[in-house]
Image: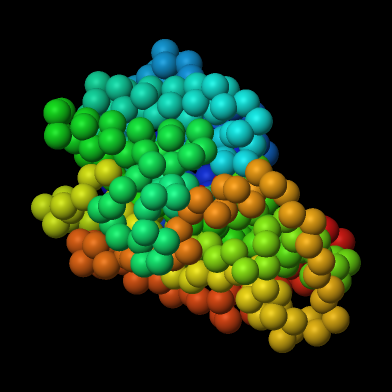
Amino acid sequence: MKKILIVGAGGQIGSELTAYLRSIYGANNVVATDVRECESLSSTGPFEVLNALDAKAFAEIVNKYKIDTIYNLVALLSAVGEKDPMFAWSINMGALTNSLEIAREYGCALFTPSSIGAFGPSSPKDSTPQDTLMQPTTIYGVCKVTGEMISNYYNLRYGLDTRSVRFPGIISNLTLPGGGTTDYAVEIFYEAVKSGKFTCPIPSDMFMDMLYMPDALKACVELMEADPAKLIHRNSFNIASMSFSPDIIYKEICKHIPNLQMDYKIEPIKEAIASSWPNSLDDTCARAEWGWKPDWNLENMTVDMLKHIKIKKEKGLL
Ligand code: SER
């Protein structure tokens, strides 16, 4: 049985990945850590407060629990990263270099997500290939490309079992994202149910790839369980399931909430970031090398999101 450590478990992905991994591997085999106390994580299994930049404390936890697999989910996202680029660099890269070194020292496998943000304006926009030009224009993207390259390097140089996917915007109904360019695609669902009105910060025709959380969780586990002999790519895999613009998701939600009103107040930083990213990724390599296949699309995800957020509203949780 694996002994898993999740670093940065209190964020959007971590809070759901912790529960998912605990359901598969047993609660006691999944240690969650975050820089802050987190009741929902500590009441359901082992939990430690950890600043991932503190290499000594990080290594002590790996040693204490005899960890063999690390999920490093620490990251400042794209829009918030632009407010203080060097802070974003120090957090994103500090957590990654500590994860790499500690994984090397203790012989752990390491998962670190990359992102559609690793691409830039010079990358092909549509069906962006797995291997192509990557010259991002955000500090978040610079961290992600660097992270991909150094993870690949650790695999080649030290044989470290590094694995990664390039996540698009992740849509979920449990924990809200924070500081990302794709956050609008979550916020629109909450506002549709709460107020029936949404002000969109992204231009109506701007396409970006998105993924529903259950597919994101499945991708993490399937990639980490994949036969290493079949993995040709050790930097990060393109994965994809749906690509849409604000106008398209608005029309999809209107099929269920016909009175939804949407206007636009474009946030220039988000617009610049979104326009530098691909419209849609080509995920052929992930499908071929480890069997990636999403279960969700815009239609069934919209139904499921609205169902769960309406339940929250009925319970007075919005
Ligand atoms: N969701 C991220 C962001 O918008 C992209 O990976 O920053």
Along the viewing direction, whichever of 208 and 241 lies nearer the viewer? 208
* Residue 125 placement (x, y as % from top left): 42, 61
Residue 228 relative to residue 262: left or right: left
At x 79%, y 81%, the residue is: 257
At x 59%, y 64%, the residue is: 206
Residue furthest top in the image: 56
Residue 26 relative to residue 169: left or right: left
* Residue 307 placement (x, y as % from top left): 70, 75
Image quarter of residue 83: top right
At x 35%, y 33%, the residue is: 146
* Residue 297 placement (x, y as % from top left): 50, 76
* Residue 244 placement (x, y as % from top left): 56, 71
At x 21%, y 32%, the residue is: 153
Q: Quadrant of the C terminus?
A: bottom right
Residue furthest left in the image: 229
Q: Tell me the colour scheme of the image.
A: rainbow
Along the viewing direction, whichever of 271 and 210 lies nearer the viewer? 271
User: Does residue 24 sit above or below 98 in this rendering?
Assistant: below
- Can residue 287 be seen at all in this image of the molecule? yes
- Can residue 69 be seen at all in this image of the molecule? no
User: Does residue 214 sit above or below 8 in this rendering?
Assistant: below
